[in-house]
Amino acid sequence: MKNGKLRILMLAPTPYFSDRGCHVRIYEEARALIRRGHDVRIVTYHLGRDMTDIPTRRIPAVPWYRKLAAGPSWHKPYLDLLLFCTAAAEVRRFRPDLLYAHLHEGAFLGIFLKMLFRIPLLFDCQGSLTTEIVDHNFVRPGSLPYRLFRMIEGFVNSRADLILTSSGPAAKDLREQWAVPEERVRALMDGVDTEEFRTFEREVVKRELDLPAGIPVAVFLGVLNRYQGIDILLEVIKIIRDRGLPLHFLIMGFPHDQYQERAVAEGLADRVTFTGRIDYRDAARLLSAGDVALSPKVSLSEANGKLFNYMACGIPVLAFDTPINREILGDAGVYARFADAADFAARLEELVLQEGRRRELAEKVRQKAVTEHSWEARGRELEDACRQAVL
């Protein structure tokens, strides 16, 4: 540490940057620390693209591994071994004051780097490892691989000097279910750059995307898979269609091919536009096409970072009623019964038909994003956590 400024090495066992929620948190946290004068470097996989404002070191290229989408893979062990070696070399060059590990894999590697180089370890936990692999249908609950991963999760949770969680409920789970001492856990919700994520002219963006004129638009931005609620969202679109409500759906994210094919097969093609993967730097402008923003996510263990972007863009938000969504949106959100497509569709219909309510909620969510969820405020909390881990 020099002049109170920290040298921080971030471990990111993922194809960073690939325009999805986990990577947005990594990027925005690194950027927030750099803005506060700290020196940050990221060590990650060979895939993904460099964000020019943050120094990034990558493992050697593995030509046959090209997976950018979220989720576990049996290729991960040898990729993480390469990441460990790359990170160890970078520790020798960079001489960091703090190892900042993202995801359980990063923390697992960080534990051995910590022992080898005697550097404190901060673990940024974005959800339960075992819950995630079950959500992705990677292992069955109670199976031998499940029990192995649960042992790894417990090992990681017990060895980090400090754990940051992306929600209050996640911090509570670590304390109560994993017996992590209270002083070693801090909640740090995601945030949003409220200068970049703002309202753009809606009709201009609708024309750019060739969306139907004169019809309200419901937007979704994120990874497209079951636990993000895309299967439920397709059910919602069918219900809305059958009710004859004039509403178009703009679904942005990847991998989208299978869902686009399903929409065509189920007669929804004229109701929904799939953009595929979009650049994070274009997200605010494209979100502004929406009159309503949707989050049908059904994972109870992960944070819900897209909500912050919706809010900062001044779009009324409909989500399932979960503790994490309540923590983020408060009384500025509209809630449907958890995992209930019919109730989600009913709340959506009400919101579409109530233009005055949408205007009120749009102002409310934007103000809440600026006053409570900006990265300027989060940056101070994050810096304080890093100093706590080092001391």
Image (tube, rainbow, N blue to C red):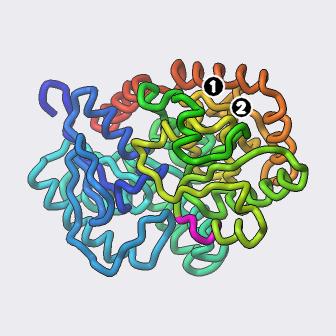
Counting from the top left corner in percent of width and height, residue 348 is at 80, 41
Q: On the image, numbered disc 2 is attached to which residue?
A: 333
At x 19% / y 37%, what residue is drawn?
Answer: 39
**SS of the residue under disc 1:** helix
Q: Which residues are magenta?
A: 255-259
Q: Quadrant of residue 103?
A: bottom left
Amino acid type assigned to the residue bearing label 1 in the image: Val
Horizontally, is 101 left or right of 129 in the view? left
Relative to 40, does residue 298 appear above or below in the rendering?
below
* Residue 110 visible in the snapshot: yes
Q: Quadrant of the N terminus?
A: top left
Counting from the top left corner in percent of width and height, residue 227 is at 65, 60
Q: On the image, numbered disc 1 is attached to which residue?
A: 365
Q: Nearer the viewer, residue 24 or 103?
A: 24
Amino acid type assigned to the residue bearing label 2 in the image: Gly
At x 30% / y 56%, what residue is drawn?
Answer: 49
Q: Quadrant of residue 332?
A: top right
Q: Residue furthest right?
A: 243
**SS of the residue under disc 2:** loop
Q: Assess whether mark 1 and mark 2 are in contact (beta carbons under 8 angstroms).
A: yes
Callout 1 crowding tier (Cα within 10 Å): few <14, some 14–19, many ≥20: many
